[in-house]
Image: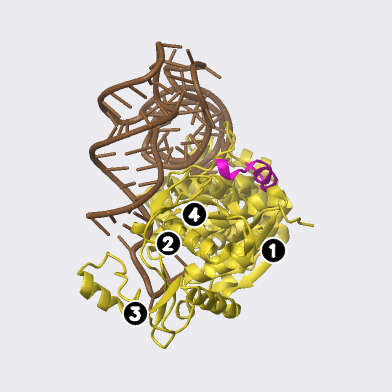
Amino acid sequence: MTDAAAPRLRFSPSPTGFLHVGGARSALYNWLVARHTGGTFILRIEDTDAERNREEWVDGIYDSLRWLGLDWDEQYRQSERTELYADAAGKLFADGLAYYCDCTRDDVVARTGDQNKGYDRFCRDRGLTQGPGRALRFRVPDDGAVVVHDLVRGEPTFEHSSIEDFPLVRGNGGALFILANVVDDVDNRVTHVVRGEEHLPNTPKYLLLWRALGGGGLPEPVFAHLPVLVNEKRRKLSKRRPEDKVELELYRDEGYLPEAMVNYLALLGWGPGGDREFLSMEELTAEFRLEDVNSSPAFFDQKKLLHFNQHYIAALSPSAFVEQSAPFLDKAGLAWERSVFEAIAPLVQERAHTLADVPGMVDFFFVEPPVLDERDWEKHMAKRADVAGPILEDALSDYGSCAWDAAALHEATGAIAERRGLGLAKAQAPIRVAVTGKAVGPPLFESLALLGRERVLSRLVAARARLAP
RNA sequence: GCCCCCAUCGUCCAGUGGCCUAGGACGCCAGCCUUUCAAGCUGGUAACACGGGUUCGAAUCCCGUUGGGGGUGCCA
């Protein structure tokens, strides 16, 4: 199905945590290009650092990717490919392109007197052979420069003299990121390397290594270094700052829709041109181009994400809304009835910004007595007992005899308001607090109608008793 | 310090030499609607970092300055 000329892209997360929103954005862009071009999307788990990887993170990455709707065509795990890296390392050493080194970090710093200076090439010509505690380093050519061909950044150029003899293999024999990454890209015949800008400084090393390895006789991949995602302080989003909220599954658990997340993420560093903002996965796939990606950092704005989410929730079909809300109602511990929720759902759907908002809007249907918000009680009942009391009395008697549907209740309440010289907005407040426990919620009369006369009256009685014991 | 990247409203995106007295969206403010809260509608707020060039003409091209960011691990 995919011919030799078709693009091959990979998303290669390291399972040192759950999927990061920045990682999700990279995955999305890779996927979009692959699907747009009829190419191949590869998922490669880069778990070469055994001490920092955990199996649950790997599963978390699979789950998050599937949640977003990003399916992959091929899958690899670096921990299962260690011979490949060992072979490459052996070849590099045999060819004199790399050398063994037994310097520790402290040794180097002691010699250079500078934490940030990099390796001083001390072992370059010591003729060390492979052995415990000896790392393999790449011998960077003294003269020349590497030019990176980057679809979003042009052609950043790095002088060889500014690149240290970087390590490829640890003293314990394990391959480092750069080695495994390049060996796999060659082996996987990757044509486009699309990743975060933080990898740009690695790219000259990547290219040097790629060429040293012969690149499998294939053309060099073309790069696209995406702008970093930053927080309000313009710092790269970090897993170490909880307020950055970078873990994708946090959003899933808080009731964000994957289509909202995908749409929002796509717009961080790219725009379809013109004034459109809401795009389906199909439209994104058709219109996305790496050449149009911006090069400046993008602020991950949770407020705007929320707006997208509200839009997508409102766009759900009524039944889909019920379906998607169900897990959130369950999680809130509500003994909810489907028929009741279905009846009120449309009025809740247009108010919810996340699915996690839903339980709090409908809990009064399923909890007896309703959970009372003390502040709302204070404000609308206790402090205004002189008006709340009579309204409750009126409601108790009028609701006892009027027809039981939203229109009749509306009318009856309007009559009470008029009788007490109040606007409907003011008059309904005590009734709402008495019946739902809160001052805000879905439209009152529909709610009352659905709740039934008996439960409404008993709640009014309870409120009256609490107001004037 | 060194290497590299970046620079349009507070934020995201549009703009690729004249259509720009710079457009859309989020946010914020105001009004309308309204049974609460939302939603919706209408209007408002607010930007081409600075300085030099190039050009008949620059937000758009070039150089510099300033500012911001990323990297600088035997992490990825």
- 1 or 2: mark nearer the eye: 1
Can residue A65 be seen here? The reply is yes
- 2 or 4: mark nearer the eye: 4
To which chain does the residue with label 1 belong? A
To which chain does the residue with label 3 belong? A
Q: Are marks 3 and 4 on the same chain?
A: yes
Q: Residues within 10 Å of mark 2 (few under 14, many from 20)?
A: few
Residue under circle 4? Answer: A438
Marks 3 and 4 sit apart, C-alpha to C-alpha, by 78 Å
Residue under circle 1? Answer: A337
Comes first in the chain, label 2 or label 3: 3
Residue under circle 2? Answer: A469
Q: Which residue lies most toward the bottom here?
A: A132
Q: Which residue is painted at 48% across and 72% down in the image? A: A16
Residue under circle 3? Answer: A126
Marks 2 and 4 sit apart, C-alpha to C-alpha, by 21 Å
Query: What kind of residue is marked 4?
Result: Lys
Q: Which residue lies most toward the right here?
A: A1
Please name the predominant secondary structure of the magenta segment in the image: helix
To which chain does the residue with label 4 belong? A
Query: What kind of residue is marked 3?
Result: Arg
Q: Quadrant of the C terminus of chain A?
A: bottom left
Comes first in the chain, label 1 or label 3: 3
Query: What kind of residue is marked 1?
Result: Glu
Q: Give the residues drawn in magenta, as a range.
A: A279-291
Image coords of residue A67 (percent x, y): 63, 61
Contact between labelled residues 1 and 4, with CB atoms less than 8 Å apart: no
